[in-house]
Image (spheres, rainbow, N blue to C red):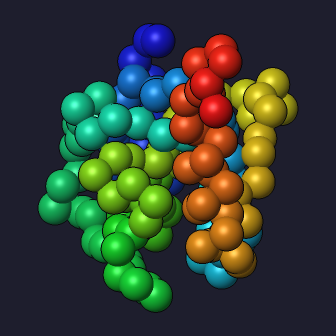
Amino acid sequence: MPVQTGSCHCAAVRFAYVPSPGPTFHCNCSLCHRRGAVWQGCAAAQFGLLAGQEDLLTYTFGTHTAQHFFCRHCGVAPFSHPRLSPRHWVINLRCVDGVDLSARVVHLFDGQHWEEAAEAFLQSRAPAPADGAE
């Protein structure tokens, strides 16, 4: 996949990444619902901060596992380390240059019922058993 670029609203924070294969999703947890983010995964090695390290602040809540990064100037949150996989990134596609969200299938991650949604997501990603295996 090609490298994608994006930024916060004021462009103080700029980044580049290569998307991981997998679904595009929105989450209905108390934070994501209010933020209106649409997320796409990214492996840690496929993400790079181009500018704005000094302009980033971090917000955590609940278990304090997820780290939500936002610009201290404009308040926009372009990426996070998600609770489900805190060594990876999720990118807010509303902050990515040239993304047409109307051309994507966006799945729901039911963050209001996080434990159940995480289990269902992990099970859906598990490899299928080989033919004839139980």
Q: Is residue 131 above or below residue 71?
A: above
Q: Residue at x 62, y 73 (%)?
A: 114
Q: Residue at the bottom extreme?
A: 62
| Residue extending furthest toward the left | 54
> What residue is drawn where x is 70% and y is 76%?
113
Residue 130 in which image quadrant: top right
Residue shown at the point (60%, 73%) measured from the top left: 115
Residue 100 appears left or right of 5: right
Residue 122 pos. (x, y %): 56, 49
Q: Position of residue 131 (x, y in %)?
A: 65, 15
In this picture, residue 54 sits left or right of residue 88: left
33 horizontally vs 67: left or right: right
Q: Is residue 61 above or below residue 8?
A: below
In this picture, is 18 found above or below 134?
above
Rendered-image quadrant of the C terminus: top right
Q: Nearer the viewer, residue 4 or 21?
A: 21
Left or right of 18? Residue 107 is: right
**Residue 118's spot in the image, x, y percent?**
59, 61
Q: Image point 80% across, 33% down: which residue?
A: 105
Count of labels in the image:
0
- Residue 10 in view, yes or no: no
Report whether residue 107 is seen. yes
Toward the viewer: 129 or 16? 129
Percent across and percent down for residue 22 are 58, 31
